[in-house]
Protein backbone atom coordinates (compact mmCIF):
# COMPACT_ATOMS: atom_id res chain seq x y z
CA UNK A 1 0.00 0.00 0.00
CA UNK A 2 1.38 3.41 -0.98
CA UNK A 3 2.01 5.86 1.85
CA UNK A 4 3.63 9.27 1.43
CA UNK A 5 5.11 11.85 3.75
CA UNK A 6 5.02 15.56 2.94
CA UNK A 7 7.43 17.84 4.82
CA UNK A 8 6.63 21.53 4.68
CA UNK A 9 9.57 23.92 4.94
CA UNK A 10 8.00 27.40 4.99
CA UNK A 11 10.99 29.69 4.57
CA UNK A 12 11.81 31.60 1.37
CA UNK A 13 14.36 34.23 0.36
CA UNK A 14 11.45 36.30 -0.94
CA UNK A 15 7.65 36.17 -0.87
CA UNK A 16 6.31 36.10 -4.43
CA UNK A 17 3.38 38.38 -5.14
CA UNK A 18 1.26 35.57 -6.65
CA UNK A 19 1.96 32.92 -4.00
CA UNK A 20 -0.80 31.85 -1.62
CA UNK A 21 1.14 29.09 0.17
CA UNK A 22 1.98 29.31 3.87
CA UNK A 23 5.49 30.80 3.83
CA UNK A 24 7.78 33.07 5.84
CA UNK A 25 11.00 34.94 5.11
CA UNK A 26 14.26 33.11 5.79
CA UNK A 27 16.14 35.21 8.34
CA UNK A 28 18.85 33.20 10.11
CA UNK A 29 20.03 29.70 10.99
CA UNK A 30 18.72 29.95 14.56
CA UNK A 31 15.08 29.99 13.56
CA UNK A 32 15.91 27.31 10.97
CA UNK A 33 17.28 25.09 13.76
CA UNK A 34 14.17 25.78 15.85
CA UNK A 35 11.87 24.74 13.02
CA UNK A 36 13.70 21.46 12.44
CA UNK A 37 13.41 20.71 16.15
CA UNK A 38 9.66 21.26 15.78
CA UNK A 39 9.48 18.81 12.87
CA UNK A 40 11.28 16.16 14.90
CA UNK A 41 9.06 16.80 17.91
CA UNK A 42 5.95 16.45 15.75
CA UNK A 43 7.24 13.10 14.48
CA UNK A 44 7.76 11.94 18.05
CA UNK A 45 4.36 13.18 19.27
CA UNK A 46 2.22 11.92 16.40
CA UNK A 47 3.95 8.73 15.22
CA UNK A 48 2.44 6.72 18.08
CA UNK A 49 -1.03 7.48 16.75
CA UNK A 50 -0.17 6.26 13.25
CA UNK A 51 0.62 2.70 12.30
CA UNK A 52 4.29 2.48 11.23
CA UNK A 53 4.37 2.12 7.48
CA UNK A 54 6.77 1.60 4.63
CA UNK A 55 7.21 5.03 3.07
CA UNK A 56 6.84 4.95 -0.72
CA UNK A 57 7.41 8.68 -1.24
CA UNK A 58 8.74 11.70 0.63
CA UNK A 59 8.23 15.23 -0.63
CA UNK A 60 10.02 18.30 0.73
CA UNK A 61 7.86 21.27 -0.29
CA UNK A 62 7.62 24.87 0.65
CA UNK A 63 8.60 27.55 0.84
CA UNK A 64 12.06 26.82 -0.49
CA UNK A 65 13.26 23.54 1.05
CA UNK A 66 16.53 23.70 -0.90
CA UNK A 67 17.52 26.27 1.76
CA UNK A 68 17.51 23.43 4.31
CA UNK A 69 20.87 22.19 5.52
CA UNK A 70 21.51 18.61 4.45
CA UNK A 71 22.16 17.60 8.07
CA UNK A 72 18.61 18.69 8.90
CA UNK A 73 17.18 16.52 6.14
CA UNK A 74 19.12 13.57 7.54
CA UNK A 75 17.83 14.39 11.04
CA UNK A 76 14.24 14.17 9.77
CA UNK A 77 14.95 10.83 8.06
CA UNK A 78 16.48 9.46 11.29
CA UNK A 79 13.54 10.65 13.38
CA UNK A 80 11.06 8.91 11.05
CA UNK A 81 13.05 5.68 11.02
CA UNK A 82 13.33 5.73 14.81
CA UNK A 83 9.52 5.72 15.00
CA UNK A 84 9.23 2.78 12.60
CA UNK A 85 8.67 4.69 9.34
CA UNK A 86 11.26 3.28 6.96
CA UNK A 87 11.72 4.12 3.30
CA UNK A 88 10.79 1.42 0.79
CA UNK A 89 13.57 0.17 -1.47
CA UNK A 90 12.28 2.29 -4.36
CA UNK A 91 11.09 5.28 -2.31
CA UNK A 92 10.77 8.47 -4.35
CA UNK A 93 12.33 11.39 -2.44
CA UNK A 94 11.65 14.81 -3.97
CA UNK A 95 12.86 18.25 -2.96
CA UNK A 96 11.66 21.54 -4.44
CA UNK A 97 14.49 23.90 -5.37
CA UNK A 98 14.59 27.51 -6.48
CA UNK A 99 17.33 28.56 -8.91
CA UNK A 100 20.43 29.95 -7.20
CA UNK A 101 19.79 28.03 -3.95
CA UNK A 102 21.86 24.99 -4.84
CA UNK A 103 25.54 24.50 -5.70
CA UNK A 104 27.54 21.55 -6.99
CA UNK A 105 28.70 20.49 -3.50
CA UNK A 106 25.16 20.95 -2.08
CA UNK A 107 23.72 18.82 -4.88
CA UNK A 108 26.25 16.07 -4.12
CA UNK A 109 25.26 16.21 -0.45
CA UNK A 110 21.57 15.90 -1.27
CA UNK A 111 22.14 12.96 -3.59
CA UNK A 112 24.22 11.22 -0.94
CA UNK A 113 21.46 11.89 1.63
CA UNK A 114 18.96 10.01 -0.54
CA UNK A 115 17.22 12.75 -2.53
CA UNK A 116 16.50 11.24 -5.95
CA UNK A 117 14.15 13.76 -7.56
CA UNK A 118 14.42 17.56 -7.87
CA UNK A 119 11.56 19.93 -8.70
CA UNK A 120 12.82 23.26 -10.07
CA UNK A 121 10.71 26.42 -9.79
CA UNK A 122 11.81 27.91 -13.11
CA UNK A 123 8.56 29.80 -13.90
CA UNK A 124 10.04 31.88 -16.76
CA UNK A 125 13.38 32.95 -18.27
CA UNK A 126 12.21 36.53 -18.80
CA UNK A 127 13.93 38.71 -16.17
CA UNK A 128 11.27 41.43 -16.37
CA UNK A 129 8.52 38.88 -15.75
CA UNK A 130 10.49 37.37 -12.87
CA UNK A 131 10.88 40.80 -11.29
CA UNK A 132 7.21 41.58 -11.77
CA UNK A 133 6.03 38.48 -9.86
CA UNK A 134 8.62 38.98 -7.11
CA UNK A 135 11.07 36.19 -7.89
CA UNK A 136 14.57 36.87 -6.57
CA UNK A 137 16.49 34.69 -9.02
CA UNK A 138 17.45 35.73 -12.55
CA UNK A 139 17.31 33.82 -15.82
CA UNK A 140 21.09 33.44 -15.55
CA UNK A 141 20.66 31.75 -12.17
CA UNK A 142 18.10 29.38 -13.68
CA UNK A 143 20.38 28.43 -16.56
CA UNK A 144 23.23 27.66 -14.15
CA UNK A 145 20.96 25.48 -11.99
CA UNK A 146 19.60 23.55 -14.97
CA UNK A 147 23.14 23.12 -16.35
CA UNK A 148 24.20 21.67 -12.99
CA UNK A 149 21.29 19.21 -12.80
CA UNK A 150 21.77 18.13 -16.41
CA UNK A 151 25.51 17.62 -15.96
CA UNK A 152 24.87 15.34 -12.99
CA UNK A 153 22.22 13.40 -14.97
CA UNK A 154 19.78 13.56 -12.07
CA UNK A 155 16.01 13.12 -12.26
CA UNK A 156 14.42 16.56 -12.28
CA UNK A 157 11.11 18.27 -12.99
CA UNK A 158 10.48 21.89 -14.02
CA UNK A 159 7.64 24.33 -13.36
CA UNK A 160 6.57 26.69 -16.14
CA UNK A 161 4.31 29.65 -15.25
CA UNK A 162 2.51 31.58 -17.97
CA UNK A 163 -0.33 34.03 -18.71
CA UNK A 164 1.75 36.68 -16.90
CA UNK A 165 1.20 40.44 -17.31
CA UNK A 166 2.43 41.70 -20.71
CA UNK A 167 3.41 38.16 -21.72
CA UNK A 168 3.01 37.09 -25.35
CA UNK A 169 2.67 33.64 -26.87
CA UNK A 170 6.16 34.00 -28.34
CA UNK A 171 7.51 34.57 -24.79
CA UNK A 172 5.94 31.32 -23.58
CA UNK A 173 7.20 29.46 -26.64
CA UNK A 174 10.73 30.75 -25.99
CA UNK A 175 10.58 29.66 -22.31
CA UNK A 176 9.35 26.23 -23.34
CA UNK A 177 12.05 25.77 -25.98
CA UNK A 178 14.80 26.62 -23.48
CA UNK A 179 13.40 24.23 -20.87
CA UNK A 180 13.11 21.37 -23.35
CA UNK A 181 16.77 21.80 -24.32
CA UNK A 182 17.74 20.62 -20.81
CA UNK A 183 15.75 17.38 -21.24
CA UNK A 184 13.81 17.30 -17.94
CA UNK A 185 11.85 14.13 -17.18
CA UNK A 186 8.79 15.96 -15.87
CA UNK A 187 6.94 19.19 -16.65
CA UNK A 188 4.38 21.12 -14.58
CA UNK A 189 2.98 23.97 -16.71
CA UNK A 190 0.61 26.36 -14.90
CA UNK A 191 -1.56 29.30 -15.89
CA UNK A 192 -1.09 32.08 -13.32
CA UNK A 193 -4.13 31.93 -11.02
CA UNK A 194 -5.02 35.05 -9.03
CA UNK A 195 -7.90 36.61 -7.08
CA UNK A 196 -10.08 38.87 -9.23
CA UNK A 197 -8.72 42.20 -7.91
CA UNK A 198 -5.05 41.21 -7.58
CA UNK A 199 -2.55 43.79 -8.87
CA UNK A 200 -1.06 41.24 -11.28
CA UNK A 201 -4.37 41.00 -13.13
CA UNK A 202 -3.48 44.24 -14.93
CA UNK A 203 -2.29 43.73 -18.53
CA UNK A 204 -2.65 39.97 -18.43
CA UNK A 205 -3.49 38.18 -21.71
CA UNK A 206 -7.21 37.85 -22.35
CA UNK A 207 -8.83 34.45 -21.74
CA UNK A 208 -8.71 33.42 -25.40
CA UNK A 209 -4.94 34.06 -25.52
CA UNK A 210 -4.45 32.18 -22.25
CA UNK A 211 -6.19 29.15 -23.74
CA UNK A 212 -4.05 29.50 -26.87
CA UNK A 213 -0.93 29.52 -24.67
CA UNK A 214 -2.15 26.45 -22.79
CA UNK A 215 -2.93 24.56 -26.00
CA UNK A 216 0.46 25.44 -27.49
CA UNK A 217 2.30 24.23 -24.38
CA UNK A 218 0.35 20.96 -24.20
CA UNK A 219 0.78 20.17 -27.89
CA UNK A 220 4.50 20.94 -27.79
CA UNK A 221 5.10 18.73 -24.77
CA UNK A 222 3.21 15.83 -26.34
CA UNK A 223 5.25 16.21 -29.54
CA UNK A 224 8.41 15.87 -27.44
CA UNK A 225 7.33 12.55 -25.94
CA UNK A 226 5.69 13.77 -22.71
CA UNK A 227 2.51 12.09 -21.49
CA UNK A 228 -0.16 14.26 -19.83
CA UNK A 229 -0.95 11.91 -16.95
CA UNK A 230 -2.72 14.66 -14.94
CA UNK A 231 -4.29 18.02 -15.82
CA UNK A 232 -1.20 20.08 -14.93
CA UNK A 233 1.53 17.45 -15.17
CA UNK A 234 3.44 15.83 -18.02
CA UNK A 235 6.20 13.23 -17.80
CA UNK A 236 8.40 11.01 -19.86
CA UNK A 237 7.36 7.33 -19.49
CA UNK A 238 8.04 6.09 -15.96
CA UNK A 239 8.84 9.53 -14.54
CA UNK A 240 5.47 10.71 -13.18
CA UNK A 241 5.44 12.14 -9.65
CA UNK A 242 4.60 9.08 -7.56
CA UNK A 243 3.98 11.20 -4.47
CA UNK A 244 1.34 13.39 -6.08
CA UNK A 245 -0.19 10.55 -8.08
CA UNK A 246 -0.67 8.48 -4.92
CA UNK A 247 -2.50 11.39 -3.28
CA UNK A 248 -4.77 11.81 -6.32
CA UNK A 249 -5.53 8.08 -6.17
CA UNK A 250 -6.64 8.41 -2.54
CA UNK A 251 -3.74 6.76 -0.73
CA UNK A 252 -2.75 7.93 2.74
CA UNK A 253 -0.17 10.62 3.43
CA UNK A 254 1.21 12.34 6.51
CA UNK A 255 1.96 16.06 6.37
CA UNK A 256 4.63 17.41 8.71
CA UNK A 257 5.27 21.06 9.53
CA UNK A 258 3.41 24.34 9.72
CA UNK A 259 0.09 24.24 7.79
CA UNK A 260 0.79 20.72 6.44
CA UNK A 261 -2.25 18.56 5.66
CA UNK A 262 -2.65 14.81 6.17
CA UNK A 263 -5.11 12.20 4.95
CA UNK A 264 -5.63 8.77 6.48
CA UNK A 265 -7.94 5.93 5.51
CA UNK A 266 -9.62 5.99 8.90
CA UNK A 267 -13.21 5.05 9.66
CA UNK A 268 -15.75 4.71 6.86
CA UNK A 269 -14.62 7.48 4.52
CA UNK A 270 -11.27 8.77 5.76
CA UNK A 271 -10.05 11.70 7.83
CA UNK A 272 -8.17 14.89 7.02
CA UNK A 273 -6.28 16.93 9.58
CA UNK A 274 -3.82 19.80 9.41
CA UNK A 275 -1.38 21.85 11.42
CA UNK A 276 -1.71 25.53 12.45
CA UNK A 277 -0.98 28.02 9.63
CA UNK A 278 1.84 30.03 11.26
CA UNK A 279 5.18 29.01 12.70
CA UNK A 280 4.35 30.50 16.11
CA UNK A 281 0.98 28.74 16.34
CA UNK A 282 2.58 25.47 15.19
CA UNK A 283 5.31 25.74 17.83
CA UNK A 284 2.76 26.61 20.51
CA UNK A 285 0.64 23.55 19.78
CA UNK A 286 3.68 21.28 19.90
CA UNK A 287 4.89 22.78 23.18
CA UNK A 288 1.49 22.31 24.81
CA UNK A 289 1.05 18.67 23.69
CA UNK A 290 2.20 15.34 25.06
CA UNK A 291 0.83 13.52 22.00
CA UNK A 292 -1.01 14.57 18.85
CA UNK A 293 -3.81 12.14 17.98
CA UNK A 294 -6.06 13.75 15.37
CA UNK A 295 -9.08 12.89 17.55
CA UNK A 296 -7.90 15.48 20.11
CA UNK A 297 -7.20 18.30 17.67
CA UNK A 298 -9.35 21.45 17.70
CA UNK A 299 -12.41 21.19 15.44
CA UNK A 300 -10.90 23.68 12.99
CA UNK A 301 -7.96 21.31 12.37
CA UNK A 302 -9.72 18.03 11.58
CA UNK A 303 -12.41 16.77 9.23
CA UNK A 304 -13.98 13.33 9.52
CA UNK A 305 -15.22 12.80 5.98
CA UNK A 306 -18.79 11.82 5.20
CA UNK A 307 -19.74 9.74 2.18
CA UNK A 308 -20.73 12.70 -0.03
CA UNK A 309 -17.44 14.49 0.77
CA UNK A 310 -15.37 11.40 0.01
CA UNK A 311 -17.31 10.94 -3.24
CA UNK A 312 -16.72 14.55 -4.30
CA UNK A 313 -12.99 14.20 -3.59
CA UNK A 314 -12.90 10.94 -5.53
CA UNK A 315 -14.60 12.48 -8.57
CA UNK A 316 -12.36 15.54 -8.64
CA UNK A 317 -9.04 13.77 -8.16
CA UNK A 318 -9.78 10.93 -10.59
CA UNK A 319 -11.04 13.28 -13.30
CA UNK A 320 -7.73 15.15 -13.00
CA UNK A 321 -5.98 12.00 -14.16
CA UNK A 322 -5.59 10.74 -17.72
CA UNK A 323 -7.29 7.47 -16.78
CA UNK A 324 -10.31 9.32 -15.40
CA UNK A 325 -13.07 7.57 -13.47
CA UNK A 326 -13.41 3.81 -13.98
CA UNK A 327 -17.01 2.76 -13.34
CA UNK A 328 -16.17 -0.58 -11.74
CA UNK A 329 -13.74 1.07 -9.31
CA UNK A 330 -16.29 3.73 -8.36
CA UNK A 331 -18.97 1.07 -7.84
CA UNK A 332 -16.66 -1.01 -5.62
CA UNK A 333 -16.09 1.98 -3.32
CA UNK A 334 -19.48 3.72 -3.29
CA UNK A 335 -22.05 1.23 -4.60
CA UNK A 336 -24.41 0.85 -7.58
CA UNK A 337 -26.75 3.75 -6.78
CA UNK A 338 -23.93 6.26 -6.45
CA UNK A 339 -22.46 4.97 -9.70
CA UNK A 340 -25.74 5.79 -11.47
CA UNK A 341 -25.78 9.27 -9.90
CA UNK A 342 -22.24 10.14 -11.02
CA UNK A 343 -22.75 8.68 -14.47
CA UNK A 344 -25.94 10.66 -15.06
CA UNK A 345 -24.24 13.84 -13.81
CA UNK A 346 -21.44 13.46 -16.34
CA UNK A 347 -23.79 12.55 -19.18
CA UNK A 348 -25.59 15.90 -19.01
CA UNK A 349 -25.92 17.66 -22.35
CA UNK A 350 -23.92 20.69 -21.14
CA UNK A 351 -20.91 18.43 -20.50
CA UNK A 352 -21.05 16.39 -23.70
CA UNK A 353 -18.21 18.38 -25.33
CA UNK A 354 -16.08 18.33 -22.17
CA UNK A 355 -16.24 14.73 -20.92
CA UNK A 356 -15.80 11.49 -22.85
CA UNK A 357 -18.22 8.99 -21.28
CA UNK A 358 -17.95 5.33 -22.27
CA UNK A 359 -19.23 2.01 -20.97
CA UNK A 360 -16.05 1.64 -18.91
CA UNK A 361 -15.66 5.13 -17.45
CA UNK A 362 -15.38 8.87 -17.98
CA UNK A 363 -12.48 11.25 -18.55
CA UNK A 364 -11.94 14.87 -19.54
CA UNK A 365 -11.16 15.64 -23.16
CA UNK A 366 -8.89 18.54 -24.19
CA UNK A 367 -11.70 21.06 -23.94
CA UNK A 368 -12.74 19.59 -20.59
CA UNK A 369 -9.22 20.04 -19.26
CA UNK A 370 -9.42 23.73 -20.14
CA UNK A 371 -12.80 24.05 -18.39
CA UNK A 372 -12.29 21.46 -15.67
CA UNK A 373 -13.84 23.56 -12.88
CA UNK A 374 -17.14 23.56 -14.77
CA UNK A 375 -17.06 19.74 -14.87
CA UNK A 376 -16.03 19.44 -11.22
CA UNK A 377 -18.98 21.58 -10.15
CA UNK A 378 -21.37 19.00 -11.64
CA UNK A 379 -19.88 16.14 -9.60
CA UNK A 380 -19.74 18.03 -6.29
CA UNK A 381 -22.37 16.55 -3.98
CA UNK A 382 -24.17 17.46 -0.76
CA UNK A 383 -25.35 14.89 1.73
CA UNK A 384 -28.96 15.15 0.51
CA UNK A 385 -27.91 14.52 -3.09
CA UNK A 386 -26.91 10.92 -2.40
CA UNK A 387 -29.44 8.09 -2.79
Image (cartoon, rainbow, N blue to C red):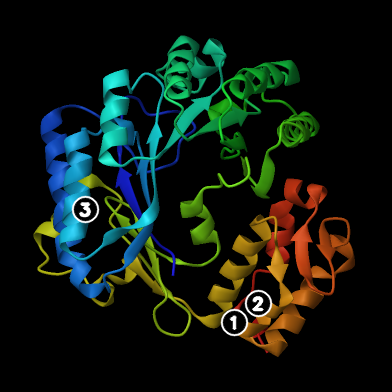
Disc 3 to disc 2, C-alpha distance:
38 Å
Q: What residue appears at the point 71 percent right and 33 percent down from the top-left corner?
A: 221
Name the spot of residue 361 as percent of width and height, x first.
77, 70
Name the spot of residue 26 as percent of width and height, x first.
24, 29
Q: Which residue is mark 2?
A: 329
Disc 1 to disc 2, C-alpha distance:
7 Å
Marks 3 and 2, the one that precedes in the sequence: 3
Q: Residues within 10 Å of mark 1 (few under 14, many from 20)?
A: few
Please, is residue 167 above or below residue 255 in the view?
Answer: above
State how many labels appear: 3
Q: Nearer the viewer, mark 3 or mark 2?
A: 2
Please, is residue 37 above or below residue 138 in the view?
Answer: below
Please state which of residues 172 and 20 is positioned toward the viewer in this rendering. Answer: 172
Q: Which mark is residue 282?
A: 3
Q: Which mark is residue 333?
A: 1
Please, is residue 319 above or below residue 336 in the view?
Answer: above
Marks 1 and 3, the one that precedes in the sequence: 3
Name the spot of residue 48 as percent of width and height, x first.
19, 72
Discs 1, 2 touching: Cβ within 8 Å: yes
Discs 3, 2 touching: Cβ within 8 Å: no
| Residue 285 seen in the current view | no
Q: Quadrant of the C terminus?
A: bottom right
Mark 3, secondary structure of its residue: helix
| Residue 90 seen in the current view | yes
Mark 2, secondary structure of its residue: helix
Amino acid sequence: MAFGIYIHYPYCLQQCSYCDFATALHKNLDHDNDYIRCLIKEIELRAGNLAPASITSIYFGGGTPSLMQTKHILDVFKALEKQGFKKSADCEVTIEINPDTISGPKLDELLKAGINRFSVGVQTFNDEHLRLVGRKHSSSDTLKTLDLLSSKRVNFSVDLLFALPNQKITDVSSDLEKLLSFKPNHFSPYILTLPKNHLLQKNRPIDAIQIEMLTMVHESLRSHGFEQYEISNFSKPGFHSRHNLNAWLGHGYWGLGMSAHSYLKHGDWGVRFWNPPTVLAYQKQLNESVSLPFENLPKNQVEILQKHEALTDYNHTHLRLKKGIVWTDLKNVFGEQVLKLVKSSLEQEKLQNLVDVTTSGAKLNERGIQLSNLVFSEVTFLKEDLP
